[in-house]
Image (spheres, rainbow, N blue to C red):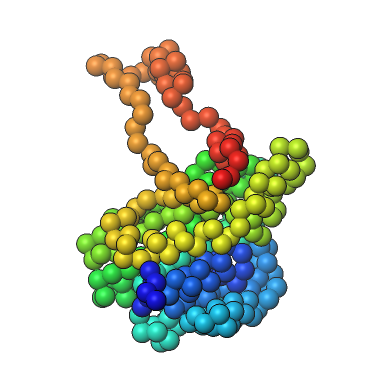
Amino acid sequence: MSKILNGKVAIVTGAGQGVGAAIAKGLAADGASVVVNDVGVTLQGEVENASAADDVAKEIRDAGGEAVGNSDSVSEWDAAQRIVQTVIDTYGRVDLIVNNAGILRDAIFHKMQPDQFEAVLNVHLHGAFNVSRAAAPHFKEQQSGSYVHMTSTAGLIGNFGQANYMAAKMGIVGLSRSIAMDMQRVNVRSNCIAPFAWSRMVSSIPTETEADKIRVAKLKRMTPEKIAPLVAFLGSDAAEKISGQIFSVRNNEIYLFSQPRPVRTLHRGDGWTADALAEILPDAFGTWMTPLERSADVITWDPV
């Protein structure tokens, strides 16, 4: 039976468990051969299960799919080259990169340390660049390929105590858009997904208030397996005209996010002074300004 990813080869980073594992298994079920990448550490970077990638790859093979494991770190340039070389050596090509690897170092901004900020950017943003860049020459040579990067509504909208995570996830949006524009001429696409799913990446959400408890209860109803179909579609030939976009998956809902565009203008023929702006700008722009909201404040309805 023909499947949407028959003949395609994918790399999924951070695929030892949670969303990444669900994506890897879903892509394999849709016909792709998969390199499952994971260093096997906790969200805090401590070794937890060094065989995580191999374990998921074995699950895929036991289910009749095609997969191999890889435990190189996306945060290191040379290691990212090895990840891509693994797929070339094993399957002879690569068609889809899923940048899913991530860690957390949550802290309120005025207490966040430089190493906490750098560690998160190294895995999320530098990792996405490293793996994407390692695959780019292969995509260019074969004149095809697709990138799917995991962003987050924490970055797109906001969250408390996650300046590092928010900066990384918004950086990924810019990276994806740039890849889409630079590689469009060689038929390479790049898109983002902001996934809603209960996994270890969101299991650290505090539940001190009743509102947070309700939020977590909703998240627990959204399984990681719901993310895989959109990833498979974006990696398939059926999505050949879709690039530079930001999507979200929330249980059975799929969203297309807007991207920054001008929403209001002020003009003064003889130019502006600070005093003139103080007099006019607050009222002229006031209701158009984006409030300081969290993701949960904006997406308030129950998941379908």
Residue at the far left: name it.
185
The vertical placement of 21 against 212, above or below, is below
Residue drawn at the location 46% of the way across and 21% of the way down? 287
Q: Residue at x 43, y 24 (%)?
A: 288
Q: Nearer the viewer, residue 130 or 264?
A: 264
**Quick check: 29 above or below 188?**
below
Using the image, determine if residue 111 lies above or below residue 119: above
How many numbered tags mark residues here?
Answer: 0
Q: Could one spot residue 285 in this view of the protein? A: yes
Q: Residue furthest front?
A: 1
Residue farthest to the right? 208
Q: Residue 113, image x and y in percent?
A: 65, 52
Q: Pinpoint residue 65: horizontal percent, then vertical percent.
A: 50, 80
- What residue do we see at 44% from left, 58% from top? 230
- Residue 185, by quadrant, is bottom left
Relative to the observer, which residue lies in front, 45 or 187? 187
Q: Which residue sits at x=55%, y=80%?
A: 63
Q: Nearer the viewer, residue 29 or 124?
A: 29
In the rendered image, the quadrant that contains the N terminus is bottom left
Q: Quadrant of residue 116?
A: bottom right
Please say whether residue 128 is visible from this viewpoint. Answer: no
Image quadrant in which the C terminus is located = top right
Measuring from the top left, give residue 50's x and y in whole percent. Answer: 65, 79
